[in-house]
Image (spheres, rainbow, N blue to C red):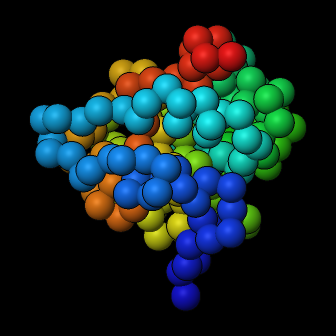
Amino acid sequence: MPYQGAHKGRPYDGLRAGGDDVNLTVMEESSFHNPPDTVIYEILSRPCRIAVVGCSPDPVRDSYHVTQLLIEKGHTVFPVNPSAQTILGRSCYSALSDVPTPVDMVDIFRRSESVGPIVEEAIVIGARIVWMQRGVINPAAAARAQQAGLMVIMDRCPAVEYKRLF
């Protein structure tokens, strides 16, 4: 049986799309808006469990550095890359469904056209937040995530947001 909601009883209950603290509506494909800075700040200020899809073991790649920063900021990070065994001393998983612990946020370092199936998997595992990195833009996948009740951040980088908001 698929995991039935990592969000229940966790710190971000009000930060989900349609929650009491955020007035987000399901977007049309051409009218996506990221949540306000106060919501992004709240997400980044609380330690959570983050799966980084497309995380690279190569220290010159952005995904490696962002993963390292998320770890330094106190988040529990699960690298997802079917070609790697470990990244930054952490076991690597082939797919989101292989991560043995509920995940709060899915951070996506993949091409925009690859995001749809990742969002579907994020919904199935009960993630609360889908974060698409800079340059990763898929309005249809974002709309699907929002329709399922997930918070969506698109075309933004947590590392940049930490510098900008903290």
User: For the view shown, which residue lies furthest in the bottom direction?
Assistant: 1
Front in this rendered view, residue 128 or 122: 128
Front in this rendered view, residue 76 or 59: 76
Residue 123 image position (x, y, % from top left): 44, 64
Q: Quadrant of the C terminus?
A: top right
Residue 161 image position (x, y, % from top left): 57, 19
Query: Quadrant location of residue 84?
Result: top right
Up-down relation of residue 79 to residue 26 (above or below): above
Q: Quadrant of the N terminus?
A: bottom right
User: For the view shown, which residue lies furthest in the front direction?
Assistant: 20
82 with respect to 134 (left or right): right
Front in this rendered view, residue 140 or 129: 129
> Residue shown at 60%/30% (left/top)?
41
Residue 88 image position (x, y, % from top left): 81, 32
User: For the view shown, which residue lies furthest in the right direction?
Assistant: 89
138 with respect to 3 (left or right): left
Residue 102 image position (x, y, % from top left): 67, 65
75 with respect to 79 (left or right): right
> Residue shown at 46%/57% (left/top)?
20
Say how many tags the image has: 0
> Residue shown at 71%/34% (left/top)?
45
Res. 6 visible in picture: yes
Res. 150 visible in picture: no
> Residue shown at 54%/67% (left/top)?
126
Up-down relation of residue 17 to residue 70 (above or below): below
41 with respect to 145 (left or right): right
